[in-house]
Image (tube, coloured by chain):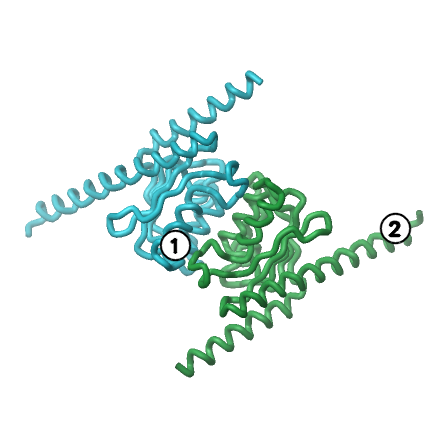
Chain colours: A cyan, B green
């Protein structure tokens, strides 16, 4: 194989991965939509293994009255149940908003291979914004990160939610 | 009131607090004992509000096949259910082992006031060992930390568990 063919194959692999990432991020956005319908901050998540969605989750913190009901936690719980193991090796998690400290911690603890993020959360995100808990060298596991997949669309969904919330509050 | 009386009152307040801390830590150790009976790493936890235990939890990670079944997470879930709110303001969490990154994150996210720790976890703890996630200035909440309450006893329980595990493994 000459060098050009090699580069061509490499590029086509990258394009396939980006296309897959966008496809799964749209499924995560659909989950965020479910949160929105419950008047929850619209964050959604899917977990994928060997090209198959094995778990879905969305933010239900107010509905469930539980901090542990963030999108990622709900999806991780379901994925563990599905695989019958707390170790989620070989899995990729797609989440519409950069995970918080708890969810980043759970992603590392469950040994998920890769985390694909839509919008970043500069004030509270822990996959590179405030901290990068997914890649602390001292822990026994590090997570590959891909940022900004449909980031603008994920961000618009969140901004729209908070704008509506402000308008509703100002009318009270 | 003269200075000596003032100091006396201050000291007696400190002694009361230490006595209470040890009392609640013993309850957390009893929870850790439940984990041990299931062959789980013996970590236990109680959550206290206004002098009353409102939730208990112990490590069930292998039993439940879920990363989210750490002692602290189980107790936080129960406390939220008890109070009907994801915000656990006014609560103190007692845990026999320094919390991991996920549990430290959940403690901050649920706005628990204070975290009382038995044994420290130098290789993976996130309340001062690898990181101190409980007191990151950029987050919207910081948690007061008290370390080393019955630390030796909590540590012995863990060391005994791991020693037995090694002996059992060496016999296989």
Residue A137 at least partly seen: yes
Which residue is drawn at the image coordinates 46% and 42% (left, top)?
Answer: A70
B116 horizontally vs A71: left or right = right
Label 1: how many Cα within 10 Å (few below 14, some 14–19, many 20+): some
- Residue B18 in the figure: left or right of residue B77: right
Tell me the residue at 52%/20% (across/down).
A168
Q: What element carries label 2?
A: helix
Identity of the residue drawn at 61% across and 67% down: B154
Q: Give the residue number, with chain letter if any, for mark 1.
A: A81
Q: Is B139 left or right of A20, judged from the image as shown?
A: right
Is B4 situated left or right of A72 in this image? right
Image location of residue B31, percent across then percent down: 60, 63
Residue A105 drawn at (x, y percent): 46, 51
Closer to us: B39 or A133: B39
Circles 2 and 1 on the same chain: no
Question: Marks 2 and 1, Cα distance to the nearest angstrom?
Answer: 57 Å
| Tag 2 residue | B6
In percent of width and height, residue A33 lies at 38, 32
Instruction: Give the quarter of the figure containing the C terminus of chain B.
Output: bottom left
Figure quadrant of residue A20: top left
């Amino acid at each position: 194989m000459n060098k050009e063919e090699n580069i061509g194959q490499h590029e086509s692999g990258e394009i396939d991965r980006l296309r897959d990432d966008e496809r799964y991020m749209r499924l995560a956005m659909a989950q965020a939509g479910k949160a929105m319908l419950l008047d929850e901050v619209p964050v959604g998540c899917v977990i994928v293994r060997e090209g198959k969605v094995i778990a879905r989750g969305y933010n239900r913190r107010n509905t469930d009255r539980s901090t542990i009901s963030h999108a990622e936690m709900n999806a991780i719980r379901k994925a563990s149940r599905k695989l019958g193991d707390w170790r989620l090796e070989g899995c990729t998690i797609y989440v519409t908003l950069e995970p918080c400290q708890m969810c980043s911690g759970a992603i590392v603890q469950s040994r998920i291979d890769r985390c694909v993020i839509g919008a970043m959360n500069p004030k509270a995100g822990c996959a590179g914004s405030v901290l990068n808990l997914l890649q602390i060298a001292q822990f026994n596991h590090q997570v590959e990160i891909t940022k900004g997949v449909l980031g603008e669309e994920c961000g618009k969904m969140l901004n729209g939610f908070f704008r509506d919330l402000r308008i509703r509050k100002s009318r009270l």
